[in-house]
Image (cartoon, grey):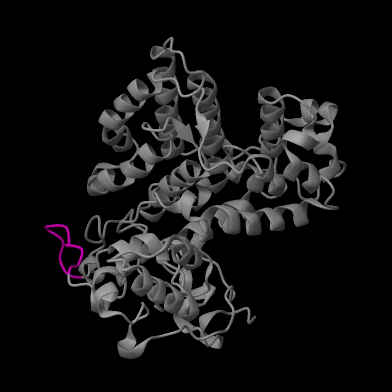
């Protein structure tokens, strides 16, 4: 694929180089990341199933949506979503201008999440709807193909992946003890996580007959639900106060589900989206990228592990022995990036108990392995078969590349995982467009 992006790719706005334009300059990526194919289009310019009834209710295309997102009051034309020309806003948010031009997410737009279905999948789904007499919803198989089919990426997906890969590159070859700049915003985020940690101590588990899912977690979560916006307002400067309600949603989604009392990679993705939103509004900057992983995200992992152990939380969407881990994925990606070109630690060493105990304080990957061995019993090859297989990969760079592909396929493209992901003006659901 050409290295310079959309101008040389016949996918135009769907090229990966164009898809990262809504991020700050330090988060933007170059290079075409999608296959050079033209997107399927039905008659009338609609990308959805040709049935009028289905399209009118489910079509995510702008032409089929009669409602639009309202522009926040007090913003002049051409202003960003959270303040006209605020100095701390990223250049892209100011350039994206009028939010009212973005169609409101319909039911199908939410179900399609980050991808648009291919034409064959749409025809099969439409035929299934007609055969089963469905009104306004697709069968499960069709919905799953939506997530796996090729097509234009949603802006939220492009921004999120660009954020993850930028941080992956920033921590390459660096230990957790590496000296890095710690800004005031980073310190405030750590203080926020310390508050969540303190609330765990103040809300001990209760006695109950069931072994898993201690109901005291709901008390802890209710406190977070009530105080989330106040916590976020301590991090976001006053001139960006209008962004607090939207950003706070991602914080509440990042600690698990209070109904099921579970936690998984979807909640972890919500915290990464929380950090991505802070980058997009200018609270976190390019100098913070190492501290985002080593100080903020690492502290988040400590709090989540304490939650899991204290309230015996169930893994959400776990694939059991066929999954990488019950709860986390991103620390394996960033942790493997830390170990690239290490002088003596190779992938085969992370199954060695001695190597893990000696180096876990320096590398996130080994810290995850240590936590797994503490929580699970039996041979490592049996309870963590995927990780055992990864230990046979010859180099950390190949491990890192493979984990990124696996994260896209097993987390971001799986409907049970990503169905709860929230979209808004910072991480919009509309397709990537050329800018």
Q: Is residue 344 above or below residue 401?
A: above
Q: Is residue 432 visible?
A: no
The magenta stretch is 67-77
Question: In terms of depth relative to the viewer, which is nearer, 150 or 171?
Answer: 150
From the viewer's perspective, is 239 left or right of 360? left
From the viewer's perspective, is 333 left or right of 47? right
From the viewer's perspective, is 256 left or right of 70? right
Residue 290 percent coordinates (x, y): 58, 45
Q: Which residue is drawn at the image coordinates 84% and 38% (left, top)?
A: 349
Question: In terms of depth relative to the viewer, which is nearer, 124 or 345?
Answer: 124
Please identify the quadrant where the N terminus is shown.
bottom right
Image label count = 0
Please identify the quadrant where the C terminus is shown.
bottom left
Q: Which residue is drawn at the image coordinates 62% and 52% (left, top)?
A: 168
Residue 182 percent coordinates (x, y): 51, 37
Residue farthest top in this picture: 207
Q: Is residue 402 above or below residue 222?
A: below
Residue 317 percent coordinates (x, y): 52, 43
- Which of the 4 image quadrants contains residue 154? bottom left
Is 75 contained in the magenta span? yes
Q: Which residue is drawn at the image coordinates 29% and 48% (left, top)?
A: 246
Q: Is residue 64 above or below residue 391?
A: below
Q: Is residue 391 above or below residue 205?
A: below
- Which of the 4 image quadrants contains residue 77? bottom left
Main SS of the magenta part reads loop
């Amino acid at each position: 694929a050409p290295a310079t992006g959309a101008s040389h790719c016949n996918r135009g706005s769907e090229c990966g180089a164009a898809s990262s334009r809504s991020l700050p300059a330090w988060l933007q990526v170059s290079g075409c990341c999608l296959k050079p194919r033209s997107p399927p289009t039905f008659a009338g310019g609609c990308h959805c199933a040709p049935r009028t009834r289905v399209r009118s209710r489910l079509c995510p295309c702008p032409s089929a949506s009669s409602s639009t997102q309202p522009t926040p009051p007090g913003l002049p034309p051409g202003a960003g979503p959270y303040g006209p020309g605020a100095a701390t806003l990223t250049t892209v948010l100011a350039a994206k201008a009028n939010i009212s031009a973005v169609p409101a997410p319909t039911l199908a737009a939410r179900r399609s999440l980050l991808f648009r279905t291919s034409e064959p999948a749409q025809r099969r789904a439409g035929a299934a709807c007609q055969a089963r007499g469905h009104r306004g919803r697709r069968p499960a198989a069709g919905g799953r193909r939506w997530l796996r089919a090729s097509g234009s990426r949603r802006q939220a997906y492009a921004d999120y992946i660009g954020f993850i890969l930028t941080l992956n590159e920033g921590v390459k070859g660096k230990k957790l003890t590496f000296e890095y700049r710690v800004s005031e915003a980073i310190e405030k985020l750590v203080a926020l996580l310390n508050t969540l940690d303190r609330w765990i101590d103040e809300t001990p588990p209760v006695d109950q007959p069931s072994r898993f899912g201690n109901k005291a977690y709901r008390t802890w979560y209710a406190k977070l639900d009530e105080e989330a916006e106040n916590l976020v307002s301590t991090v976001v400067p006053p001139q960006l106060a209008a962004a607090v309600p939207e950003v706070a949603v991602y914080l509440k989604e990042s600690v698990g589900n209070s109904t099921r009392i579970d936690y998984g990679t979807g909640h972890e993705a919500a915290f990464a989206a929380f950090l991505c939103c802070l980058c997009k509004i200018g609270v976190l900057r390019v100098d913070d990228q190492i501290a985002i992983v080593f100080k903020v995200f690492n502290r988040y992992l400590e709090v989540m592990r304490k939650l899991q152990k204290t309230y015996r939380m169930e893994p959400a969407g776990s694939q059991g022995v066929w999954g990488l881990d019950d709860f986390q994925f991103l620390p394996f990606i960033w942790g493997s990036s830390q170990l690239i070109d290490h002088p003596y630690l190779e992938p085969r060493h992370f199954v060695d108990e001695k190597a893990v105990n000696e180096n876990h304080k320096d590398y996130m990957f080994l810290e995850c392995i240590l936590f797994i061995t503490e929580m699970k019993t039996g041979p490592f090859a049996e309870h963590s078969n995927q990780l055992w297989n990864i230990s046979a990969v010859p180099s950390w760079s190949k491990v890192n590349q493979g984990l990124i592909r696996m994260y896209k396929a097993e987390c971001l493209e799986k409907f049970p995982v990503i169905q709860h992901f929230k979209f808004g003006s910072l991480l919009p659901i509309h397709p990537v467009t050329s800018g």
